[in-house]
């Protein structure tokens, strides 16, 4: 794979370019997406799809969501130029951060959660369930459930409840039930399995508030739509600030919701390179990473066909990342499509690189990022070497998808900041 | 190995003396005789691959009419805790997809059609056409596909047509009349009616919506409808057999193996429960149709 394909013409002979990439809708993105779920869920997915498109056409829905974002989320989120950090990216490179970390609940996740929670009210359902990895989506869901008076159950892999204990307490404070999942790899993948089982059994009263751009149609399309405000704001903010579009946009990709959110507004700007950074973990060996575009192949998991870490039998290979939010063996189907048509470039960032970038942003700019987002920062440093070829004054837009309060314990162990620690704790 | 008998429809006169590889002719004959079938689920590789061969043989010998052989998968979202535990054990023990085909081959001649129950990615990865070919060659009857709906199944429909295999899709209490019709049209062998909204596992009562779902599925054109999810006792089997063409039992059978102190005891208990369930199914009051189908 060549790194510099973002913004280049599409690969000939692949997906015909029919109109806008940004407005492409499900259920399929090329050969990806679809609905690989039990029949029991199809009626609910159809009902959701109908309700979602009705809401889209209803100005009152958009107005209510915009009001919540203004008065509750704190949108628009700021755009911050980070020159002291940018000095490490490359000479003459300007770096801007889209500050989703400053949203209420501490990450971009609230954008999608509020949108879906308003839909739940329209569906007349009284209970929401969610999966969570790092806890960001679980916290956002518990928050929206408290705000709108919904019952809330969050499934979280037992391993993640331990490495993200603060977020478990946060969800419980907000009134949610947190269920540790003790089967399989005990991480995000297994939390989604449990949430799907709950949904099959309780679909009449319960909405599965899926937290990323994966899963069966209409989730990848709907979740993207609820997050595209990130890119729309950033695009307008950059135009106002510097009068032009960025040369490159960088985001971390677990399931891929923050990346789709910031990519969408730039998909049709062919000169804007799009980069997604996956968790390279400890290296690209079996079970050591979550780099689906390096070590994966198309397959089906959790309702969608997409790139997937799988063995030769099609069994899911456990992923690893220092960041719980990127520790997932598959990826949103729209990313797989953007990868295959050459519109976006996906590269791995190792645990070490991410943690170095984490510390660098703390010390150079006074911003503690989520470890997930630190992968995008490390990615900006990776691509900084080629930035000089893009323009005289290259501009990189990085989506700072979340803040690092939840990661302080992990980082303190990693860097040996706890006094009685040798600094090798999490490696 | 003899060529697989290609039986393309569930209707039509079956030769009662034949031992059909697919389920349609068997269910046609049962309907004519006024009886329902016991469909027993066991996962490959539990407690070991050879152990699962012994278990399936015991299942058939004790009275199961159709075998549902589960292919272990890392992410079984339609299965409850008992089956999850068994397939987790099977995977840790190194059970492979090709082991399933080997087990099919070893049990297919036992007198009961053998369906493989599989999550879809395993077949996708193997190659849909290649899997259909190898399953047919092994003497398998077809596939039960819990996470594949007919809308996504074009490749499997073509491959199962080419190799004369059953394709058992699921319907649920939430299925709309339109979806019942399209699922019935795409199915062959029988339609799997999930008795309740939920994953596999034992329940005190079989969902009250099961009987209505069977009636609706028949009204949508299904020749045969079997009921699964939550059936575990002989009394429940009798009740379900009074209105369904087949009674599918999984978790309760797997539990006999999981709870047993050793393999031999597990197989004894499995055989015991199977014969009780078979008796329960046969005790159902069911009029003989006197002809094929319904």
Image: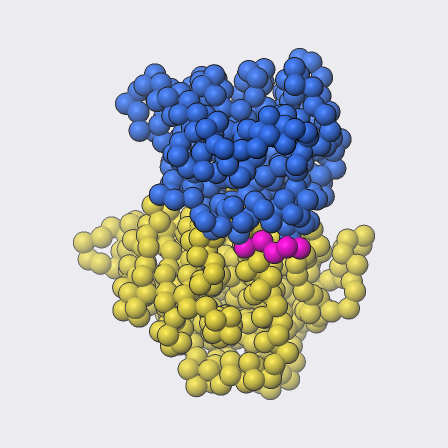
Q: Is residue B65 placed above or below B209 in the rendered structure?
A: above
Magenta part of the chain: B174-178
What is the number of callouts on the image? Answer: 0
Asked whether B177 falls inside the magenta stretch, the response is yes
Residue B39: x and y, percent?
A: 51, 30
Q: What is the display colour for chain A?
A: yellow
Horizontal arrangement in the rendering, residue B248 relative to residue A235 (left or right): left
Whether residue A291 is in magenta: the answer is no
Q: Is residue B190 above or below residue B63?
A: below
Q: Between B177 and A75, which is closer to the camera in this rendering?
A: B177
**Which chain is assigned blue?**
B
Question: Which x, y percent locates residue A297?
Answer: 61, 43
Q: Nearer the viewer, residue B272 or B216?
A: B216
In which quadrant of the rendered view does residue B26 lie? top right
Tell me if A155 is positioned left or right of B243 in this view. left
Q: Residue furthest left?
A: A420
Nearer-the-camera pick, B53 or A368 = B53
Q: Quadrant of the C terminus of chain B?
A: top right
Answer yes or no: is residue A294 visible: no
Structure colour scheme: by chain
Using the image, determine if residue B22 lies above or below residue A1. Answer: above
x%, y% of residue A183?
37, 43
The residue under the point 30% across, 49% down is A424
- Going 40% across and 20% down the picture, which residue do you hit? B271
The residue at the point 62 percent across, 74 percent down is A54
The quadrant of the image that shows the N terminus of chain B is top right
What's the magenta bit mostly, secondary-structure-wise?
Answer: loop
Q: Which residue is located at x 19 percent, y 57 percent?
A: A419
**Can residue B240 be seen?**
yes
**Percent x, y of residue B240:** 48, 38
């Amino acid at each position: 794979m060549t790194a510099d394909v973002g913004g280049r013409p599409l690969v000939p002979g692949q997906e015909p370019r029919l109109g806008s990439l940004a407005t492409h809708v499900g259920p399929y993105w090329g050969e990806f997406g679809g609905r690989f779920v039990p029949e029991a869920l199809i009626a609910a997915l159809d009902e959701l799809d109908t309700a979602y498109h009705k809401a889209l056409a209803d100005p009152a829905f958009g107005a209510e969501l915009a009001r919540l974002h203004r008065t509750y989320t704190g949108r628009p989120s700021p755009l911050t130029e980070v020159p002291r950090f940018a000095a490490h990216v490359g000479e003459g490179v300007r770096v801007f951060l889209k500050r989703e970390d400053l949203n209420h609940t501490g990450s971009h996740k609230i954008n999608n959660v509020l949108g879906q929670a308003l839909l739940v009210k329209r569906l007349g359902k009284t209970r929401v369930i969610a999966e969570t990895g790092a806890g960001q989506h679980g916290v956002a869901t518990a928050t929206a459930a408290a705000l709108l008076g919904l019952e809330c159950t969050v499934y979280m892999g037992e391993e993640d409840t331990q490495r993200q204990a603060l977020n478990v307490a946060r969800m419980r404070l907000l009134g949610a039930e947190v269920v540790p999942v003790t089967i399989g790899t005990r991480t995000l993948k297994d939390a989604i399995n449990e949430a799907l089982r709950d949904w099959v059994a309780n679909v009449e009263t319960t909405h599965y508030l899926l937290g990323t751009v994966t899963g069966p149609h209409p989730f990848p399309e709907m979740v993207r739509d609820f997050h595209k405000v990130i890119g729309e704001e950033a695009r307008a903010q950059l135009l106002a600030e510097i009068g032009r579009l960025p040369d490159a946009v960088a985001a971390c990709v677990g399931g891929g919701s923050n990346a789709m959110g910031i990519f969408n507004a730039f998909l049709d700007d062919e000169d804007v390179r799009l980069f997604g950074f996956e968790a390279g973990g400890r290296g690209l060996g079996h079970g050591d990473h979550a780099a689906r575009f390096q070590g994966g192949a198309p397959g089906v998991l959790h309702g969608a066909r997409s790139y997937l870490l799988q063995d030769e039998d099609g069994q899911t290979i456990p992923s690893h990342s220092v960041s719980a939010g990127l520790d997932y063996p598959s990826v949103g189907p729209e990313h797989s499509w953007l990868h295959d048509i050459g519109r976006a470039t996906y590269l791995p960032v190792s645990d070490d690189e991410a943690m170095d970038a984490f510390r660098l942003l703390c010390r150079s700019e006074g911003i503690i990022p989520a470890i997930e987002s630190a992968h995008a920062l490390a990615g900006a440093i990776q691509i900084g070497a080629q930035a000089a070829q893009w323009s005289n004054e290259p501009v990189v837009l990085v989506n700072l998808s979340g803040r690092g309060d939840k990661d302080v314990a992990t980082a303190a162990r990693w860097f040996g900041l706890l006094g009685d620690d040798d600094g090798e704790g999490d490696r | 190995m003899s060529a697989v008998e290609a039986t393309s429809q569930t209707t039509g006169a079956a030769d009662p003396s034949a031992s059909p590889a697919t389920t349609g002719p068997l269910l046609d004959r049962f309907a004519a005789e006024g009886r329902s079938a016991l469909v027993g689920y066991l996962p490959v590789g539990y407690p070991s691959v050879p152990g699962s061969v012994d278990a399936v043989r015991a299942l058939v010998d004790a009275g199961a009419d159709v075998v549902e052989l589960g292919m272990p998968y890392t992410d079984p979202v339609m299965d409850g805790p008992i089956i999850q535990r068994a397939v987790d054990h099977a995977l840790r023990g190194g059970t492979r997809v090709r082991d399933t085909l080997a087990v099919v081959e070893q049990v297919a001649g036992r007198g009961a059609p053998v369906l493989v129950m599989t999550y879809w990615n395993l077949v996708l990865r193997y190659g849909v056409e290649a899997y259909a070919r190898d399953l047919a060659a092994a003497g398998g009857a077809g596939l039960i596909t819990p996470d594949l709906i007919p809308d996504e199944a074009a490749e499997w429909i073509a491959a199962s047509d080419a190799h004369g295999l059953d394709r058992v899709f699921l319907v649920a209490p939430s299925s709309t009349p339109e979806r019942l019709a399209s699922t019935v049209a795409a199915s062959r062998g029988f339609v799997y009616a999930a008795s309740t909204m939920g994953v596999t596992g034992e329940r005190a009562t079989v969902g009250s919506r099961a009987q209505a779902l069977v009636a609706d599925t028949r009204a949508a054109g299904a020749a045969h409808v079997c009921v699964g999810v939550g059936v575990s006792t002989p009394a429940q089997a009798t009740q379900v057999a009074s209105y369904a063409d087949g009674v599918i039992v999984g978790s309760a059978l797997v539990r006999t193996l999981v709870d047993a102190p050793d393999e031999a005891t597990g197989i004894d208990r499995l055989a015991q429960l199977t014969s009780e369930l078979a008796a329960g199914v046969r005790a159902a009051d069911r009029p003989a149709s006197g002809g094929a189908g319904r």
